[in-house]
Amino acid sequence: MSFYELDRPAAPAPGIADRLGAFVAGGFASVRNAGRSAMHSLAYARMMQVMHAMDDETLARIGITRAQIPAHVDRCLNRAPSI
């Protein structure tokens, strides 16, 4: 190490604006992810409720049995949007 590297001043600490900006950016991402997760959970619960309320004849027309409902709901909700 050279003398300059040992004696150079430390980098300035980030200001309040830098810290606040980083906090807000990280906060929005976590809120967005929490909202997405909550909406997915609600959609999963509602679809499970609807599918379990169907009679066996309707399920047969769809092509699934009662035992296949959770896998079918998961497949439907995790499919990429077809827009």
Image: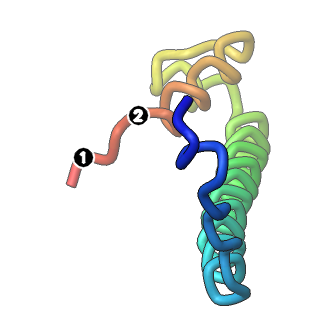
Question: Relative to 80, does residue 21 appear above or below in the rendering?
Answer: below
Q: Position of residue 76 (x, y in %)?
A: 49, 34
Q: Horizontal placement of 78 versus 51: left or right?
A: left
The residue type indicated by label 1 comes to Ser
The residue type indicated by label 2 comes to Arg
Question: Looking at this view, is 22 or 48 the one in front?
Answer: 22
- For residue 18, what is the image quadrant? bottom right
- Number of numbered labels in the structure image: 2
Q: Which residue is rendered at x = 62% and y = 18% of the image?
A: 71
Q: Which residue is rendered at x = 57% and y = 42% of the image?
A: 3
Q: Position of residue 48 (x, y in %)?
A: 74, 38
Question: Relative to 33, does residue 44 appear above or below in the rendering?
Answer: above
Q: Secondary structure at mark 1?
A: loop
Question: Looking at this view, is 57 or 15 the one in front?
Answer: 15
Q: Secondary structure at mark 2?
A: loop
Question: Looking at this view, is 39 or 24 the one in front?
Answer: 24
Question: Looking at this view, is 27 or 68 the one in front?
Answer: 27
Q: Residues within 10 Å of mark 2 (few under 14, many from 20)?
A: few
- For residue 24, what is the image quadrant? bottom right
- For residue 19, what is the image quadrant? bottom right
Q: Disc 1 versus disc 2: distance between alpha carbons?
A: 9 Å
Q: Position of residue 65 (x, y in %)?
A: 64, 13
Question: Relative to 58, does residue 25 appear above or below in the rendering?
Answer: below
Question: Disc 2 marks which residue?
Answer: 79
The answer to whether the residues at label 1 and label 2 have Cβ atoms under 8 Å apart is yes
Q: Position of residue 47 (x, y in %)?
A: 67, 45
Q: Residues within 10 Å of mark 1 (few under 14, many from 20)?
A: few
Q: Which numbered tag is attached to residue 82?
A: 1
- Quadrant of the frame with the N terminus: top right
